[in-house]
Image (tube, grey):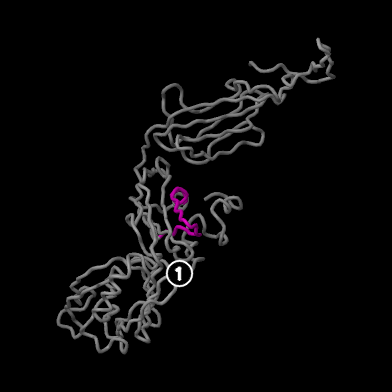
């Protein structure tokens, strides 16, 4: 072992007189073990990584152990080629360190190990290795919607290629998926089902924001059967805050831009038995022309409620066929009565104005209807119809934590999921 000799007691320093009358201490700084250059700690440690050109099994945890009674591990830092840290635990006596998070497949790693001997002299060793291919099935993630500019109500979605049901596996997925906005806002993922996550902020996105979704799941073990793959990042922007409030009892729709009223339109909404859904809906898309038939919502042909109509300037707000659209056939009821089969109808001119004003992601909120509340998932984006507290409960990492508390904060107070 090529480190400084052990010095148990330092009695004194002798002043030496040299030419010119200068004084120098015989005890230089290099005489103390703590000031010596770190020695090669290879003889003090054992590492379970691969030997030579062999590749490590990504499913096997890393382990570093101290060798000999005088050796002690003081620190271990493991990172992959992308700079991601591998979490680990070091025993109190410094005899063993092991990783506590999965390794990525087909990835280069560096492990830096610090040690000390019985006198406290420091040792150091850096090791590198490559992990092999994963045997598990690839788990792909696709962010949505497509890149572009949207209204402030547009959630970010993450669609998985396979179901993830286990709580621990979901935590791995959630930790790897990140959404950031400029300006910054508080937000959270919510599991809509075992293959779909939605991300929304506490309130609507700010107008004029930039939103970026990224994944660090590539190569990461999710569970015994799934491993993450690389995901294309997503970048969105938001436009002005456009919100249309449909009052089903007064039969008027008021439209706001960034909080200021810009128009008020007489409308008709769903009649008895077909009441328009209450709550917040998000514009899904716009269709200049749609052929609307009663059979599409379960009304049989020949029924007194049956219809087959050409519809223009149709702005869709649910997957099941609720639109804001032109309804010239019911002009006498606009502003006075609810006579539709669930859609919000208005004059052709007003429908054209609305169609040209809104974009995907804008907000249409219905109040004072006899209809049920728009469901959170399954028929479009009803994400804003539940409280922020309940939304956070749909996140594996945030469930049970206080509002404003991050997953990192929560981890300090409770065990990792």
- Is 175 inside the magenta-drawn segment? yes
Where residue 5 sits in the image (x, y, percent)?
71, 16
Which one is in front, 111 or 394? 111
Farthest top residue in view: 19
- The residue under the point 51% across, 39% down is 85
Question: Residue 193 placed where, x, y %?
Answer: 38, 59
Magenta run includes residue 44: no
Task: Indicate the quadrant where residue 26 lies.
Answer: top right
Question: From the viewer's perspective, is residue 300 above or below residue 14?
Answer: below
- Looking at the image, residue 184 sits to the left or right of residue 135; the answer is right
Residue depicted at x 75% and y 19%: 28
Left or right: 133 as drawn, with respect to 304: right
What's the residue at 26%, 82% (across, down)?
340
Front residue of 18/193: it is 18
Residue that sits furthest to the front in the current view = 20
Q: Foreground: 299 or 293?
A: 293
Residue 148 location (% of width, % of height): 33, 57
Residue 14 pos. (x, y %)? 84, 16
Question: Residue 331 occupies which quadrant of the picture?
Answer: bottom left
Span shown in magenta: 171-191
Residue 348: quarter of image = bottom left
Q: Considering the numbered disc 1 on the image, is that residue within a helix, a strand or a loop? A: loop
Q: Residue at x 38, y 53 (%)?
A: 235
Quadrant placement of the N terminus: top right
**How many neighbours does mark 1 have within 10 angstroms: few (below 14), some (14-19), or many (20 or more)?**
few
Q: How many labels does the image show?
A: 1
Above or below for 190 versus 375: above
Look at mark 1 in the image and give the residue it sits on: 386
Question: 378 above or below 146?
Answer: below
């Amino acid at each position: 072992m090529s480190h400084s000799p052990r010095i148990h007691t330092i009695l004194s320093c002798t002043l030496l007189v040299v030419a010119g009358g200068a004084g120098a201490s015989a005890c230089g700084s290099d005489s103390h073990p703590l000031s010596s250059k770190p020695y090669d700690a290879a003889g003090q440690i054992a590492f379970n990584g691969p030997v030579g050109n062999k590749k490590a099994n990504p499913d096997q945890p890393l382990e570093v152990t101290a060798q000999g009674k005088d050796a002690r591990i003081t620190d271990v830092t493991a990172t992959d080629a992308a700079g991601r840290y591998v979490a680990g635990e070091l025993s109190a006596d410094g005899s063993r360190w092991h990783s506590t998070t999965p390794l990525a497949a087909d990835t280069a790693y560096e492990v830096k190990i610090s040690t000390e001997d019985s006198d406290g002299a420091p040792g150091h060793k850096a090791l590198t290795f490559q992990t092999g291919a994963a045997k598990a099935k690839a788990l792909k993630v696709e962010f949505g919607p497509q890149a572009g500019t949207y209204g402030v109500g547009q959630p970010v979605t993450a669609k998985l290629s396979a179901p993830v049901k286990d709580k621990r596996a979901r935590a791995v997925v959630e930790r790897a998926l990140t959404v950031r906005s400029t300006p910054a806002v508080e937000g959270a993922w919510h599991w809509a089902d075992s293959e779909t996550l939605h991300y929304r902020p506490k309130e609507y996105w700010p107008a004029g924001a930039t939103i970026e979704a990224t994944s660090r799941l590539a190569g990461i073990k999710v569970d015994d059967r799934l491993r993450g793959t690389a995901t294309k990042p997503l970048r969105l922007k938001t436009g002005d805050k456009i919100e249309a409030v449909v009052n089903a009892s007064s039969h008027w729709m008021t439209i706001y831009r960034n909080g200021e009223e810009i128009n008020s339109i007489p409308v008709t909404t769903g009649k008895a038995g077909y009441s328009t859904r209450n709550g917040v809906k998000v514009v899904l898309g716009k269709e200049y022309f749609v052929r609307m038939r009663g059979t599409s919502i379960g009304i049989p042909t020949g029924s007194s409620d049956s219809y087959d109509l050409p519809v223009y300037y149709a702005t869709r707000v649910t997957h099941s066929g609720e639109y804001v659209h032109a309804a010239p056939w019911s002009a006498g009821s606009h502003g006075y009565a609810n006579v539709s089969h669930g859609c919000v109808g208005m004059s052709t001119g007003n429908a054209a104005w609305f169609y040209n004003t809104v974009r995907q992601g804008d907000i249409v909120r219905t109040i004072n209807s006899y209809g049920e509340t728009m469901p959170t998932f399954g028929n479009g984006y009803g994400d804003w119809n539940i409280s922020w507290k309940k939304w956070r409960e749909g996140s594996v990492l945030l469930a049970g934590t206080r509002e404003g508390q991050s997953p990192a904060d929560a981890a300090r107070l409770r065990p990792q999921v």
